[in-house]
Each structure stands twice: as C-alpha cells, then as structure tokens.
Amino acid sequence: MKIQHIFFDLDNTLWDHRGNAFSTLKEIFKRQEVRDKYNLDFDDFHREYFTINERLWEQIRDGEIDKEYLRKHRFYDSFLFFGIDDFDLAQAFESNFLDEILNYNDLVPGAFEVLEYLHDKGYQLHILSNGFEEVTHKKCELSGIQNYFQTITSADEINIRKPQPEIYDYALKKAKASPAESIMIGDDWIADVEGGKSFGLQVIYFDVFDDKFEADEVKVIKKLIELKELL
Ligand SMILES: [Mg+2]
C-alpha cells in the first residue's frame, strides 16, 4: 500500500530541542549567576544536565516516572551532581525553562526544505510528540512549521506515551490514517522506531546523535534531507 501519511516526532527530529535548550539554559545560568556563586562552568553543567534529562525522559517514556517527577528532578539532580544542593535554584530553572525555551525556535537543519518537498508531493503530514502538551503546539507555531501539519498530537493529551500502542492508535485515528499507509519518522529508537513498527507502521530512524541502532526493515537517515531519497 502506498504511503499517504507521514508522522514526525518533534523534539530533535524537526525542532532542535538540544540546541534551543542549550541557548535557554545558558541565559538562565547567567541570570542566576551560577558561575560566580558556585564556581561552576556552564558547559560542564550542561553536559551533565543533558545526560540526566535524557535519562529522565527515557523513564517517562517507559512509564517509570511521571512528568512532575521529571520537573522536580532534572535541574536539582544536575546541580547535585556538582555538590550543589539547592532546591530553590533548581526550581527557578524549571519554572523559567519551559516559558523561555519558546524564545528559541531553531529547527533541525533541512527541516523546512524536507517539509516543503513532502507537502508538494501530496503527503499528509502529522506530528506525534512525547513532549508536554503546553509547548508542543507553540513550538510548531513559533518555529513556523505549523501549517505543514494536518494534525499535531502530544502524547500528554491522553497521558500515554510512545511506544505504547494506545498513543499510536489515538494519533492515527485523529489523522484518519491506517497503519498500512503510514510511516513514522523519529530519533528515539524505542518510542518512534520500535513503537511505530509494532503498531504496523513503516519506520525511518533519524540517527541524529549517532547512536548507531539498527534492525531489519528499518531505514536509517543521518540527515533530514536524506528523506528526499526515500519518500
Ligand atoms: Mg525526539
């Protein structure tokens, strides 16, 4: 059956979450005078934060923790790694982060070109994100890609995340798409690739961080622009 519906993950697949978070945190870090107060270098902090945050998002995906736990811990645990036990500082970061990250809206290189190409070819495009509902739509709107999409689904809407079949079912129903005519493209091996595949979708793994996962019937791209050869 011919592919008619393309489901994209959002963070780090189209919207450059890593880059935008870096810029946002750098600014909050400066405003909170962390360097002077605690003798901590931003790049060291960010490296640790990135690892901790990724791990917590994996735990959310796997249903081990909820959103509140992540929001309480990602900054607190990052500072604690450097011996800084300061709950108020961590909360100041958390409460500013979600609002301020929307001031940065860089896309992953090639995103506009690829969306334009797929749109011109007549595919129906959709977003299926595991991110917070409060920011998913805003990220699409503020980065200027919103109008490419027929539907935008945040797993938060029903509090069930990829790779669970229920969220794929929900998003496909919303898109009026069948698994056989749909493809999922994303950077998370478990949520996007394994989740999509076991729901019966074709999948393309965007190996944006060079994790080198592979499996039968899974196409891999390193750059978004490679999608023009596959679709
Ligand atoms: Mg992602």
Image (cartoon, rainbow, N blue to C red):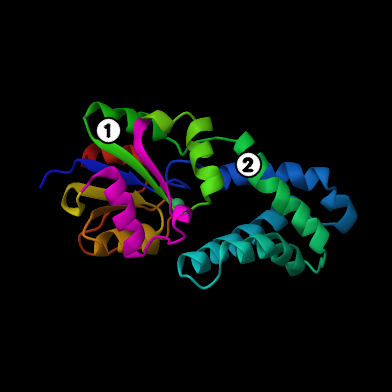
Provide residue 126's location: percent of width, then percent of height: 34, 41
Q: On the image, which quarter does residue 228 sit in?
A: top left
User: Within the magenta stretch, is there residue 171?
Assistant: yes
Q: Is mark 2 within 8 Å of ligand 1?
A: no
- Horizontally, residue 102 falls left or right of residue 219, namely right
At 32% from the left edge and 56% from the top edge, which residue is drawn? 168
Provide the secondary structure element on which disc 2 rests. Answer: helix
At 33% from the left edge and 28% from the top edge, which residue is drawn? 116
Q: Is residue 107 above or below residue 94?
A: above
User: Within the magenta stretch, is there residue 35?
Assistant: no
Q: Name the residue type under label 1.
A: Leu
Residue where numbered disc 1 is placed = 118
Provide residue 149's location: percent of width, then percent of height: 35, 35
Q: Nearer the viewer, residue 114 or 177?
A: 177
Provide residue 210's location: percent of width, then percent of height: 43, 55
- The answer to whether residue 163 is visible is yes
Q: Is residue 142 above or below residue 77?
A: above
- Horizontally, residue 148 falls left or right of residue 79, namely left
- Horizontally, residue 75 falls left or right of residue 140, namely right
Q: Residue furthest bottom?
A: 64
Q: Is residue 119 above or below residue 40?
A: above
- Horizontally, residue 1 falls left or right of residue 30, namely left
Q: CA distance from mark 2 to mark 1?
A: 28 Å
Q: Nearer the viewer, residue 51 or 177?
A: 177
The magenta span reads 148-177
Q: Residues within 10 Å of mark 1 (few under 14, many from 20)?
A: some
Q: Nearer the viewer, residue 82 or 140?
A: 140
Provide residue 213's location: percent of width, then percent of height: 35, 63
Q: Residue furthest right?
A: 37
Q: Name the residue type under label 2.
A: Ile
Residue where numbered disc 2 is placed = 101
Provide the secondary structure element on which disc 1 rests. Answer: helix
